[in-house]
Amino acid sequence: MVQQPHQRRIKYQAELDSDFGRQIAAMPGGEKVYSCIQCGACSGICPMSIYMDYSPRRIIAMIRAGMKNDALRSQTVWLCASCYACSVICPRQIKITDLMYALKQRAIQEGAYPKRFPIPVLAREFFQTVQRDGRTSEGRLIARVYLRTNPWRLLKQASLGYRLLRHGRMSMRRESIRSREELQTLLRSVG
Ligand code: SF4
Ligand code: SF4
């Protein structure tokens, strides 16, 4: 597990959100968060835990302790590969993968994700584009993600992007479905 300096900072009661655990428990996937026995089996089997700043077991402990900011701003939820190994091994049948999705959803809603970390920016941009146009073009999407996270990287990738465009492997054209209003109505109806 990668140790981050902020992990060693002392936490004060005033920094905690005592309602956070209850809010996550009310979301799909979070229902059983309070039945975790902190056995660590999920962290042991997780193939991504060596890259995470907090292990899955620790994320659950943080949710229950009300450490909302640390949980939502962690890289862990964005590094989860949705392999479901943790959900299968958990002795309390906790849906940890779905719990990670619940945290992603909250992080996007609150704009509280790790700064300049490309995965949440990609998820947000992808969702906004599909919500607006019903489709997404990979060229425009990649350009937007780079501009919002690391514009220098965009310059470095310019020649590769040019070659892909030239050979028709990527497009910068804005694509959209014909009935965008119907899509908006549909999305509004599901909240
Ligand atoms: S495997 Fe299940 S019970 Fe054990 S720490 Fe992970 S979530 Fe908690
Ligand atoms: S679903 Fe996510 S948290 Fe669970 S084992 Fe796979 S990568 Fe790790």
Image (cartoon, helix red, strand yellow):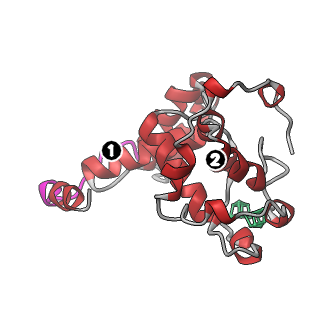
Q: Is residue 16 above or below residue 180?
A: above
Quarter of the image where the C terminus is located: bottom left
- Looking at the picture, tell me which residue is in the foreground, 188 or 146: 188
Q: Is residue 29 left or right of residue 89?
A: left
Q: Position of residue 29 (x, y in %)?
A: 54, 64
- Label 1: state its secondary structure: loop
Residue topped by disc 1: 173
How far is mark 2 from mark 1, CA to CA? Answer: 42 Å
Query: The disc labelled 2 sits on which kind of residue?
Result: Ile
Which residue is depicted at the point 28% across and 56% down?
A: 134
Please tell me which residue lies in front, 18 or 4.
Answer: 18
Q: Quadrant of residue 33?
A: bottom right
Residue at point 66%, 27% (across, down):
13
Rate crowding at label 1 as few (under 14), some (14 to 19) or many (20 or more) other CA atoms within 10 Å: few
Q: Main secondary structure of the magenta part?
A: loop
Residue name at image x 57 percent, y 28 percent = 149
Where are the magenta residues, as a range? 171-182
The residue where tag 2 is placed is 63
Name the amino acid, label 1.
Arg
Kind of element beneath mark 2: helix
